[in-house]
């Protein structure tokens, strides 16, 4: 992907056909095993001008791709490209992508740089950048390929800039200048790269060249864009003029806040550590890191069921974009689903936030309305990133929004929060088979999973692609090296014991589900338990209506409310289903109420 699209089976190159066919393949591969509808695929490859024959044209591209990618005699169910009524998807575990290698190597290199190990980071960044072999997805048509191309080019720029920063900070000015001399024409207006070039030139006693490079860029910016250099580059220019050796060679010479910026105290960073491997969330991460509207407060809602990895994704996002918020990054866990911690009221959160940005406790009021006014006034000139984790509802969130243009708020919740005015919403689902397998291989180690491929696949199926379940299962295998994967699978075969096996220390899949269940109303709880006994995996409103004697209208209200709580899925309008592990939990709850269960079972048998 990181150049013209190419594929091999072993060492043998494969013929992928014309550009449009390659664009279809790329649109499937880069969904990482997700189901892609015909309509979405047509939109992604043909854009506003889809072919009149629609899915027939897709088949004319997919069938030759199957012949190219599959080995002779491959059965349809084992094909690299799977299909169903109205959809296609790639079997991600059959394919290794260079973009996945880039994500893993790039993330590791950036973490190393953050830790301060610059020599190792520079080497890791160089290795990651060698994966590029030209423009990503070169010459592939369609809006999907164009969007992915831009995302990958931005990733390349981020890694290249990080490597150059390492080289300059390590005093390898000649290496940095060699790399800067080979930059493409598209980077001629990049002020961050020019700042590094000026620092390297000055450090090589080429002050006049540094000043000329600045002047050339200033003229280009003025003549072609009608703007002046930004604050960072202007400070570098002033430092070169003053021959401020300490500023130009120290780490403080990087992007900084203007000295006259209004703030209550130096910027604070409350973000949790970014730990663990984030697998299968590349699309969501790219979407979230596109945050930041300089003219308004951006609000993004991230929702999904318990254990799906919402907080991990948001922390990774926040760590990657924190440099955009010079006045601080604030993180508050609202404890909406916690038994050990009390849920936080808006008043308590506002007082904590005001202290975080330097407000004097003696000046902080107690009344909620006064606190909200105080918070909005204090943040009106600040650019903040605020992460609100484990939120319960909009009324809990609305008072906490800052007012400074360019600030961003990321809200994490198990609820859909339809009443929240969000600029963007991201709903996380469980991982597909390919990504779930990648996660297990990462945790347990490929030497164990590759010895037991069938047991690995069965373990992934039993964990239902839920990251929390996969991590707990992986942790149990880590801490019990004598266990085989097949042994753990055997222990989980019985549904009555499966959730019990998915528990390690204070982490438990069943406990996470229970906390979501306890937030439901009694009617919702009854509906949820009943659905655990439903005779089919997928159903409509008539199923709970018949089992409980409700009207279809009442049943639909409860089903839709359970969708909003992420305990129920809606694969298409009017149809509902539960994730497998959630269904097991609902069944266990129903069986704990024997009188109710008997009546419901009898009704289910009549369906």
Image (tube, rainbow, N blue to C red):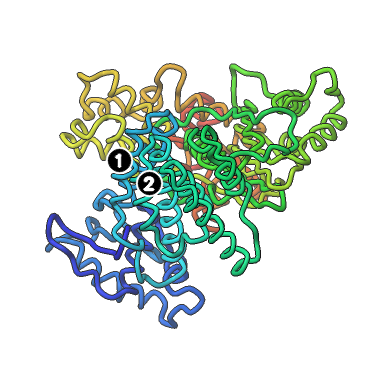
**Mark 2 secondary-structure assignment:** helix
| Comes first in the chain, label 1 or label 2 | 2
Instruction: Specify few, some or many for label 2: CA neighbours under 10 Å numbering under 14, 14-19, or 20 or more.
Output: many
Among the 4 quarters of the image, the one containing residue 458: top left
Q: Is residue 186 left or right of residue 269?
A: left
From this view, report whether residue 392 is shown above or below residue 17. Answer: above
Residue pointed to by mark 2: 176
The residue at the point 26 percent across, 51 percent down is 96
**Mark 1 secondary-structure assignment:** helix
From this view, report whether residue 436 is shown above or below residue 444. Answer: below
Among the 4 quarters of the image, the one containing residue 410: top right
Q: Nearer the viewer, residue 58 or 570?
A: 58
What percent of the width, then of the height, locates residue 26? 34, 63
Residue pointed to by mark 1: 437
Residue 466 visible to the viewer: no
What separation in Å lies between label 1 and label 2 (alpha carbons)?
Answer: 39 Å
């Amino acid at each position: 992907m990181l150049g013209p699209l190419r594929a091999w089976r072993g060492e043998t190159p494969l013929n992928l056909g014309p550009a449009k066919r390659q664009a279809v393949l790329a649109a499937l591969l880069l969904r990482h095993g997700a189901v892609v509808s015909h309509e979405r695929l047509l939109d992604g490859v043909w854009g506003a001008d889809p072919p009149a024959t629609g899915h027939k044209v897709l088949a004319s591209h997919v069938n030759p791709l199957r012949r190219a990618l599959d080995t002779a005699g491959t059965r349809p169910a084992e094909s690299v490209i799977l299909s169903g009524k109205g959809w296609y998807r790639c079997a991600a575990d059959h394919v290794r992508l260079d973009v996945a290698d880039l994500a893993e190597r790039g993330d590791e290199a950036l973490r190393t740089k953050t830790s301060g190990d610059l020599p190792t980071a520079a080497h890791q960044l160089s290795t990651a950048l060698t994966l590029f072999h030209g423009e990503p997805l070169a010459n592939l048509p369609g809006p999907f390929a164009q969007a992915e191309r831009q995302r990958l080019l931005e990733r390349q720029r981020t890694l290249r800039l990080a490597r150059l920063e390492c080289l300059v900070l390590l005093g390898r000015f000649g290496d940095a200048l060699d790399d800067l001399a080979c930059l493409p024409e598209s980077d001629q207006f990049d002020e961050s790269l020019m700042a590094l070039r000026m620092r390297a030139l000055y450090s090589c006693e080429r002050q006049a060249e540094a000043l000329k490079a600045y002047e050339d860029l200033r003229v280009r910016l003025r003549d072609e864009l009608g703007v002046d250099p930004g604050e960072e580059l202007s400070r570098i220019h002033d430092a070169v003029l003053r021959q401020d050796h300490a500023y130009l060679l120290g780490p403080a010479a990087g992007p900084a806040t203007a000295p006259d910026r209004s703030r209550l105290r130096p910027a604070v960073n409350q973000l949790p550590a970014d730990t663990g491997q984030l697998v299968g969330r590349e699309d969501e991460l790219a979407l979230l890191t596109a945050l930041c509207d300089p003219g308004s407060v951006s609000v993004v809602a991230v929702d999904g069921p318990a254990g799906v990895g919402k907080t991990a994704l948001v922390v990774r996002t926040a760590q990657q974009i924190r440099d955009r918020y010079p006045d601080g990054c604030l993180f508050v866990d609202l404890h909406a689903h916690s038994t050990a911690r009390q849920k936080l009221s808006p008043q308590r959160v506002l007082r904590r936030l005001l202290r975080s940005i330097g407000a004097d406790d003696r000046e902080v009021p107690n009344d909620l309305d006064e606190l909200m006014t105080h918070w909005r006034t204090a943040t009106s000139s600040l650019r903040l990133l605020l992460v609100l984790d484990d939120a319960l509802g909009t009324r809990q969130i609305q008072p906490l929004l800052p007012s400074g243009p360019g600030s961003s708020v990321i809200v994490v919740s198990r609820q859909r929060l339809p009443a929240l005015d969000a600029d963007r919403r991201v709903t996380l689902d469980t991982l597909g088979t390919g990504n779930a397998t990648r996660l297990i291989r990462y945790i347990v180690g490929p030497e164990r999973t590759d010895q037991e491929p069938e047991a690995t696949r069965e373990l992934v199926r039993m964990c239902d692609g839920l990251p929390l379940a996969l991590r707990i299962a992986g942790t149990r295998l880590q801490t019990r090296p004598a266990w085989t994967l097949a042994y753990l699978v055997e222990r989980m075969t019985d549904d009555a014991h499966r959730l019990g096996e998915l528990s390690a220390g204070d982490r438990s899949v069943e406990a996470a589900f229970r906390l979501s269940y306890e937030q439901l109303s009694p009617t919702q709880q009854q509906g949820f338990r009943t659905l655990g006994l439903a005779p089919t995996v997928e159903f409509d409103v008539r199923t709970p209506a018949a089992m409980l004697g409700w009207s279809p209208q009442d049943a639909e209200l409860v089903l839709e409310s359970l969708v909003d709580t992420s305990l129920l899925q809606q694969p298409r309008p009017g149809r509902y289903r539960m994730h497998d592990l959630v269904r097991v939990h609902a069944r266990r709850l129903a069986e704990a109420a024997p009188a109710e269960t008997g009546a419901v079972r009898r009704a289910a048998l009549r369906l």
